Each structure stands twice: as C-alpha cells, then as structure tokens.
Image (cartoon, rainbow, N blue to C red):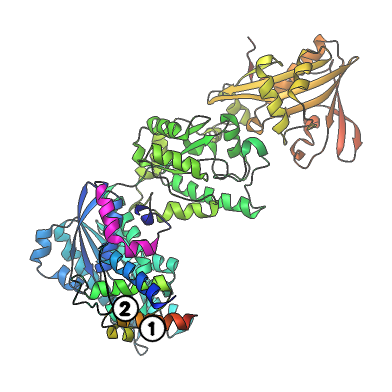
C-alpha cells in the first residue's frame, strides 16, 4: 500500500466518523479545521484506523499527532513494521 | 447497516458509521420515549453513542443525561437540579473495577478487610438510597475482575486478594438487588469474562481517554444494557418458534427416520443438537412459550420428539405447525392460536431461504441470522437478548400452563394407580382393517421408513403393496389409533403370506410413537380373526436382526409365540390359532 492509497482510506474513515461524504482532508488538516474533531472523536478516529490497518498506537504517540500528515506518516511506519 | 446491530455485531461498521446508522434507525420511526441518565465512573461518551443505536433498534427513542467524568457519586448523592428536571426513567450507574480506589493491604487484619468491604458497599448503598427519590429503575454494573493480579491464583482465595474482594462485593450487590425494588444488576463480571478481560479492558484507551471499556466490547455491553431495559419495560419476546430438521435434530426425520436423525451423545453433531434443546428447555421451564413451524408430515415431525435423546418433548410445545404451507402462514397461525402479537415471536431456522421468507413477509417477527450450524443458535438467542428477564415470577414459570391446550400425558400417567388405568383413561380407539386403496401410499411409506419396531425390515414398492392388498393369498392389516389427545394416524402394519393352513408373517411393524399402548395386542387379535376366516391354523413369525430393531428381539415371546428355530441372531416363532385368547381389552375397535 502506498501513501496515496493509505491516505484515501484515512479520508474514508474521516468521512464516516464525521458523517460527511464531501469532507476532503489534506496533510495539513488538523483538529482546528474540523469543528467536531474534539478529543472524543480523536479517539474514534484512532480506533477506526487501528481496526482498518491492524496496527496499534500507544498513548505517547497519540498526543504527538498534530495533523493528518503526521498521522499518516506514523501509520506508514507501523504498517511497514507489521510486514 | 442496521443489520450490523444484530448479533454477531459488525463492530467496525458500528463504530465508524454510527451517525449514518442512527439516521437509518430514525427512519424506522421508533416510538417509545425513554430518558436514560448515565452516571459514569469512567468516560461514557462513546458507550452512550453505541447504546443509543441499540435502544433505537429496539424501538426506543432515548434521551440521555451524562454525569461529568467520574462524578457518579456526586451526581447521585448531592442535590442535583439538572437530573431532577431531566426526570429519568432509567439510571445506569456505569462503574467498574477502576472505581475501586482502595483494595485490602497485605497488612490488614480480617476485620479491617471486612471494614473496607462494608465501606465500599456503603458508598453504593448511599447512591441507591439517594436515587430512590427519582422513583425510577436503577441499573447498576457489578465489578469486572482486574486485568492484573500480583498474587496470581492466590488472589481469589486470600482475604487480601483483589479478586476475593471483588467477588464478595459482587455477591453483596446481588443481595442488594434482591432486596431493593427497582435495582437491577448489569452483570459485567460475566460479560468481561465472556469477552475476555484482556479484550474487555484496553490499557491504552484507559490511560489516554479514561475509557474503562474497550471500543470493541461496547456493542455487547450496549446490547446487554438494552436487554435489561427491554425486560424492565416489558418489551421482551414471549414465544420461540422452531424449525425441526437440522434445527432441533440433525438430518431429516422424513428421510432418515427416527433412528437416522442426529441427536444424542454418540456423535458431536448429535450432542450439539442436545445442547441446543437443553437451552430451549430451560427457556420453556421459565415461561417462554414454544412452538414448532416445520415443513414436514405432521406425524413424522412429532415422532422426532419421541427420540430417546430428545430433551424437548412433544408436550413442551404449545403450538405445533408441521405441514407444507408457507412458514409465514404457519407463524401467523401460531400467533393467532396462542393469542399473542407477531412482535412477540422469535423464529429459528437453519435454512436461510425460510428465514428470508419469514422476515420479509412478517417483519414484526424476530428472525436472527443464525446461519445453518446449530452450534451458533444459542448465542444468537442469548446475545440478542430476546428473552431477557429481570425477575422470575411464578406467573412466568407457570405461563406455559395457562397457554397449554395439550395436556401433559406423562403427568397424567403419574396420577393413575396402574399403567392399565392410565391407558384406559386415554379412551383409545383403533381402526384395524385390511389394506384399502386410500391408505396404500401411507402404508408403503411407513413400511419403508420404519426401522425400530420392525420384525423383518422387508421393503416393498407401492406396486407390490397394491397386489398384496388385492391378493387372496395374503392377510394384510393396517391399524390406526386415536386417543383423547388426538389422532396418531395409521401407525401399524401386518402382512402375512398364506401357504396351505399356515400364515407366514412377512411383515409386522409399528411406529414407535404408539409404543406401550397395547396396539400390538389389538393387531394380533385382528390377525387371528383373519386367520380363522381363512382356515389358517398356525402362524409363523420371523425376527430378522438388523442394527436397529433390537427392541423387538423378544417381541414374539411377549406375544405368546413359541420359539421353533434360531439361526445366529435371527429366530422363528410359532403360534396356534385354536388356543389363542384375545389379548386387547383396552383399545376400543371401531371399524365402520
């Protein structure tokens, strides 16, 4: 899976969680850009990503995820480690 | 997407698409408004979202109140204007092992540990007492076991152990629930064990977001709470409708016969069906009404429950619909017959097509998507919470008596001095006549499927039976038996070939359904009479041993025949017509 493919799946997850079919995210999208992206939905996103990609985050990593780009980078690293 | 909420839940879909699922559920127009206050000892937001979906699916229109994080005690015990205005119907106290702040210390004496237990219990007693002012149902979680226990197995029996402490506390909670009206326990001690504590509690989620419940476990948790709410409100189901073949036993009774179906401890498959039957029997014993809806010949269908390993008996069923009509029609009949709504019925069938027909024709009926393997049926029944109860009232336990129109034969039997008295009370009536065209199909069918009560196990085609019926060289007799409980239909057959003044019994068989009813005596009486009219002086009976007909190995002896030859396990028997004395005096013969 390349970065674009991963990104597309992450976009799907965001659309599901925020129930918005037209939502478009980019690397720089952060919680400031999406009104409902509070700490609770942040957990929902993380759990959904964990399930979709069969990876696990630990809580230190969670607090360092500042935007979508950082999140996807971390995911790529973890998916690599899984392979 | 609503299907993701039916066991086994599609957890990923529920968690990701819950907003879309909620929109879909709102279109089903749920009606029952219900106000639920969640007083949490951990983060409750996502649990509330999932609970909302399950309640909507059950037809509730829930409103929620949530306490601030871990403010369950304060919210319950101190003046709470907001909660008063909310006027809850249900208060869910969502606490768990993380809320036990103080555990016994190793230096504590037994008295000190006791004191600690009392203090912890007192905290919750205070909560329950204070909440009594809302005059609503309180659902209280008991405690799950901790993920880790530094004492190992000793933790469960040393007084200083956390496990020991929690087990005692849980027992005290159960005691309180038995005493306090409106207090109900949500058993997360069981649920966490069922899920596995390791999957139930996720430390990452706890440390980072204070969720004491893993997201994956939320659907089962929410379903369990919804089950309790339904039981409190009285929305649970009343009647379990069962298919027969490959649902109550393995195989097809009509094809495989009573001794061909898989039921019993001999095989893994047979044991699985017994397990399912045992569970259903437990449901019945506590008040769930049972019904059968099966595509089958009625008589054959009923025969299955005469199987020695069948835990369910015919008299356990209040309604029995076995015929070739569409199942949706039969289920409507069942509801009418028992006089309950279609929405009180749950239908279990191994056949996906039948399930689809019923759920599309009768959407009110609950049809869990069980798949075809009996091993999954119990979980589908239980985890969907169809028959949840919050108390065992004597009304529930006796409910079946009120509905029952088919009196229990066995129970009756106990009331009689002797078995003959019991048989006499049945008012049995038999029709015993020579084969007639009307019954040739049924006779051929019975001949070719009867294995146990069958002396020779000879098989015949319909053509052979037709020529026997019209031949002067044969005595052919069928027997039908009815009693005050109903008609058993055509259940006994005798064929004898006449050679000179001897009658050779080619065939003697009977359906096991009418065992021990003296029908065999009535049949023999009829045979002897026929012999006399044809100038026969001697009857020769043959027993040919098969793997299935051991039950009649000594049959001719019991009937007064004399052994004249033995060949291995086969034997030949003789009876003199002249000295024969009529044997049946309990069954009235009505041959008009």
Name the residue beneath numbered marker 2. B206
Is B409 in front, or is B88?
B88
Name the residue beneath numbered marker 1. B160
Is disc 1 surrounded by few (<14), some (14 to 19) or many (20+) residues within 10 Å?
many
Q: Residue B327: x, y in percent?
A: 47, 34
SS type, badge 1: loop
For mark 2, name the chain. B
On screen, residue B584 above or below B126 = above
Q: Quadrant of residue B382?
A: bottom left
Residue A53 located left or right of residue B268: left
Residue at (23, 76) in percent of width and height: A39
Using the numbered discs, state the Cα–Cα distance from disc 1 to disc 2 in whole angstroms: 25 Å
SS type, badge 2: helix
Q: Quadrant of residue B486?
A: top right
Residue at (25, 48) in percent of width and height: B27
Q: Which residues are magenta?
A: B10-27
Q: Are discs 1 and 2 less than 8 Å apart at CB?
A: no
On screen, residue B11 above or below B341 = below
Q: Quadrant of the C terminus of chain B?
A: top right
For mark 1, name the chain. B
Is B157 in front, or is B288?
B288
Q: Name the N-terminal-most of marks 1 and 2.
A: 1
Q: Residue B573: x, y in percent?
A: 86, 28
Q: Residue B246: x, y in percent?
A: 57, 45
Residue B323 located left or right of residue B549: left
Is B219 in front, or is B141?
B219
Q: Residue B259: x, y in percent?
A: 68, 41
């Amino acid at each position: 899976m390349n970065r674009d493919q991963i990104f597309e799946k992450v976009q799907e997850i965001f659309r599901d969680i925020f129930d918005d079919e037209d939502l478009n995210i980019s690397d720089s999208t952060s919680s400031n850009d999406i009104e409902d992206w509070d700490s609770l939905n942040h957990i929902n996103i993380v759990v959904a990503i964990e399930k979709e990609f069969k990876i696990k985050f630990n809580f230190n990593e969670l607090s360092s995820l500042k935007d979508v780009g950082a999140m996807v980078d971390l995911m790529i690293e973890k998916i690599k480690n899984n392979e | 997407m609503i299907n993701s909420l039916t066991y086994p839940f599609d957890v990923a879909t529920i968690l990701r698409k819950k907003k879309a699922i909620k929109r879909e559920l709102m279109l089903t127009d749920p009606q029952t408004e219900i106000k639920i206050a969640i007083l949490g000892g951990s983060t409750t937001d996502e649990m509330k979202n999932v609970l909302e979906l399950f309640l909507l699916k059950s037809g509730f229109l829930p409103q929620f109140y949530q306490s601030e994080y871990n403010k369950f005690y304060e919210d319950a015990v101190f003046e709470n204007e907001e909660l008063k205005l909310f006027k809850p119907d249900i208060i869910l106290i969502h606490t768990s092992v993380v809320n036990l702040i103080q555990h016994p210390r190793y230096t504590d004496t037994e008295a000190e540990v006791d004191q600690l237990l009392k203090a912890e219990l007192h905290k919750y007693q205070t909560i329950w007492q204070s909440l009594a002012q809302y005059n609503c149902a309180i659902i209280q979680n008991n405690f799950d076991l901790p993920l880790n226990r530094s004492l190992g197995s000793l933790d469960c029996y040393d007084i200083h152990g956390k496990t020991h402490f929690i087990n005692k506390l849980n027992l005290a909670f159960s005691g309180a629930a038995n005493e306090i009206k409106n207090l109900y326990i949500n058993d997360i001690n069981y649920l966490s064990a069922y899920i596995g504590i390791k999957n139930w509690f996720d430390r990452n989620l706890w440390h980072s977001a204070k969720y004491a419940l893993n997201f994956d476990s939320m659907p089962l948790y929410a379903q369990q709470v919804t089950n309790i709410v339904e039981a409190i409100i009285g929305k649970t189901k009343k009647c379990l409708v069962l298919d027969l073949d490959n649902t109550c036993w393995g195989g097809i009774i009509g094809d495989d016969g009573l001794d061909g179906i898989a039921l019993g401890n001999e095989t893994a498959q047979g044991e699985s069906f017994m397990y399912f039957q045992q569970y259903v029997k437990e449901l019945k014993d506590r008040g769930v009404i049972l019904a059968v809806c099966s595509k089958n010949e009625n008589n054959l269908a009923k025969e299955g429950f005469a199987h020695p390993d069948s835990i369910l008996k015919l008299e356990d069923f209040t309604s029995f619909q076995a015929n070739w009509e569409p199942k949706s029609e039969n289920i409507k009949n069942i509801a009418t017959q028992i006089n309950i709504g279609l929405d009180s019925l749950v239908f279990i069938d191994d056949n996906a097509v039948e399930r689809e027909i019923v759920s599309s024709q009768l959407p009110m009926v609950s049809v869990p998507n069980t798949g075809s393997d009996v091993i999954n049926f119990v979980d589908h029944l239980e985890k969907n919470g169809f028959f949840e109860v919050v108390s065992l009232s004597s009304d529930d336990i006796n409910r079946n008596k009120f509905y029952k129109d088919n009196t229990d034969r066995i129970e009756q039997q106990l009331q009689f001095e002797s078995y003959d008295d019991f048989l006499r009370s049945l008012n049995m009536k038999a029709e015993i006549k020579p084969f007639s065209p009307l019954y040739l199909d049924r006779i051929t069918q019975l001949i070719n499927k009867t294995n146990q009560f069958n002396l020779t196990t000879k098989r015949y085609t319909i053509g052979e039976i037709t020529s026997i019926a019209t031949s002067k060289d044969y005595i052919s007799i069928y027997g039908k038996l009815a009693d005050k409980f109903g008609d058993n239909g055509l259940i006994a057959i005798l064929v004898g070939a006449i050679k000179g003044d001897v009658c050779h019994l080619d065939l003697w068989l009977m359906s096991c359904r009418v065992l021990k009813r003296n029908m065999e005596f009535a049949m023999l009486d009829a045979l002897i009479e026929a012999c006399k009219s044809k100038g026969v002086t001697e009857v020769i009976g043959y027993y040919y041993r098969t793997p299935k007909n051991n039950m009649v190995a000594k049959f001719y002896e019991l009937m007064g025949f004399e052994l004249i030859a033995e060949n291995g396990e086969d034997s030949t028997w003789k009876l003199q017509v002249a000295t024969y004395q009529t044997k049946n005096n309990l069954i009235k013969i009505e041959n008009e």
